[in-house]
Image: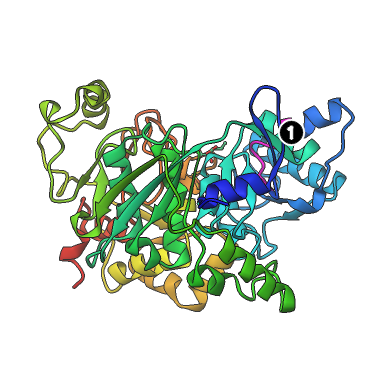
Amino acid sequence: MSARTLFDKVWDLHTISVLPSGQTQLFIGLHLIHEVTSPQAFAMLKERGLRVMYPERTVATVDHIVPTEDQQRPFQDSLAEEMMQALETNTKAHNIRFHPIGSGNQGIVHVIAPEQGLTQPGMTIACGDSHTSTHGAFGAIAFGIGTSQVRDVLAAQSLSLNKLKVRKIEVNGDLAPGVYAKDVILHIIRKLGVKGGVGYAYEYAGSTFTAMDMEERMTVCNMSIEGGARCGYINPDEVTFAYLKGREFAPQGEDWDKAVQWWRSIASDPDAVYDDVVSFRAEDIEPTVTWGITPGQGIGISEPVPTLDSLDPDDQAIASEAYKYMQFQPGQPLKGTKVDVCFIGSCTNGRLSDLEEAAKVAKGHQVAAGVKAFVVPGSEQVKQQAEAAGLDQIFQAAGFEWREAGCSMCLAMNPDKLQGDQLSASSSNRNFKGRQGSASGRTLLMSPAMVAAAAITGQVADVRELVS
Ligand SMILES: CC(C)[C@H](C(=O)O)[C@@H](O)C(=O)O
Ligand code: SF4
């Protein structure tokens, strides 16, 4: 057979049938569910008298609505309590594995599945959540889906989908100190646009990604959707296998060797043909910060906010809207802008290595007066590992709050919210208007180390000037 991409191999292996519409009925190997997008899907199932087809292929956690301070039940927010109860009832009724608060395994869905070894190369994975693309870091084809599709996967373990094209995004070279995976993906989205990936799966390839650990790869794949790509992946390699080995749901013994052999075989062939190829150089990437209201409105920390005439005509209307909402002037520097809130966490950057990098910056310093800074581990496991490494002590000594695991202020479907037009430095993935819980709240996306630098200086800062 001719050379193929990982995307094509995994797609073909999971194709049940090609429907008269031309869509593919694709088998979904792993279905992850959470409290926000599953209650209605279960209700639709009930209406039709259907059962969950493969409960053992479905795993549930609670993340969006979880309070990160007072977790006592019933939750103060009755809507949150309702969603929590629906998940408890539905997972029990359908015999689905659920990781509740306090189980040691609860956390953001895109953090817990990889850490438990559920996410594996060559799988198809779906979840009613746009950042499901995260799991592509393992060489899986992982999509975010809507609630009616959650129903379909529950009922039939399959989805009707149009096949995507594949764009290879090559980044080669070494990242400079202070430049992280987050900067790489913000740079890619800045260059290709927030709609650039529509209709594509992104394959990230090149020495910069090969050199990344799994947590960095997850940061990159997580934000594929912010570039318009439904999924993004990295071919599995020794780094992937080493990460998975020994994890709870990873294959064991003889099965392990067989699995690794198969995982190697599903990587893109060296001479595979792509629908498109683009290349970037790692040395061109600076610590990157968004200044606007889409994740594509990013700049290197040493650059000013772009002027209107420096932008592509297609980007000018949204830029004008962004200047106004963000209260920034075209051409002004971002560096030195005072921040109010600093948030370290989310499925993009709430893993152990993210907290380690932020702690290195925070260590021995104090959060600037008037700034509220807090750290929210992505999962209970991350929290426990961070505490074992003393990171909670470092953060707290520096004046950061140390919280329980959850989505927190990434989306503010819980008590963690901005107030008024506060400006937040955030390690999350979306800077949409009102995203962090206040209709006029403003968000600057950046790496966790850059958030820590903002916290201790009280302003947008260049982390490279703080640590050498
Ligand atoms: C609540 C959920 C449906 C939503 C998503 O799909 O991404 C959320 O996780 C987000 O990040 O905006
Ligand atoms: S951390 Fe943010 S982006 Fe990730 S699943 Fe939660 S709300 Fe969505």
Which of the pair 75/226 is nearer the observer? 226
**Is residue 408 shown left or right of residue 20?**
left
The color scheme shown is rainbow
Vertical arrangement, residue 374 with respect to residue 158, above or below:
below
Which of the pair 251/62 is nearer the observer? 251
User: On the image, numbered disc 1 is attached to which residue?
Assistant: 152
Which of the pair 311/361 is nearer the observer? 311
Image coordinates for residue 369, horizontal then vertical, percent: 25, 55
Mark 1 Cα shell of 10 Å, populated few (<14), some (14-19), many (≥20): some
* Magenta stretch: includes residue 249: no
**Is residue 442 shown left or right of residue 401?**
left
Quarter-of-image position of residue 217:
bottom left
What are the residue bounds of the magenta stretch? 31-40
Quarter-of-image position of residue 444:
top left
Residue 68 visible in the shown view: no
Vertical arrangement, residue 422 with respect to residue 375, above or below:
above
Residue 438 visible in the shown view: yes
**Number of numbered callouts drawn:** 1
Query: Which residue shows up at 34% across the image and 45% down it?
Result: 277
* Magenta stretch: includes residue 32: yes
Q: Which SS class for mark 1?
A: helix
Query: Which residue shows up at 35% across the image and 60% down it?
Result: 206
Vertical arrangement, residue 272 with respect to residue 40, above or below:
below
Q: Quadrant of the C terminus?
A: bottom left
What amino acid does circle 1 point to? Asp
Query: Which residue shows up at 56% across the image and 66% down it?
Result: 264
Image coordinates for residue 382, horizontal then vertical, percent: 53, 66
Farthest front residue in view: 1
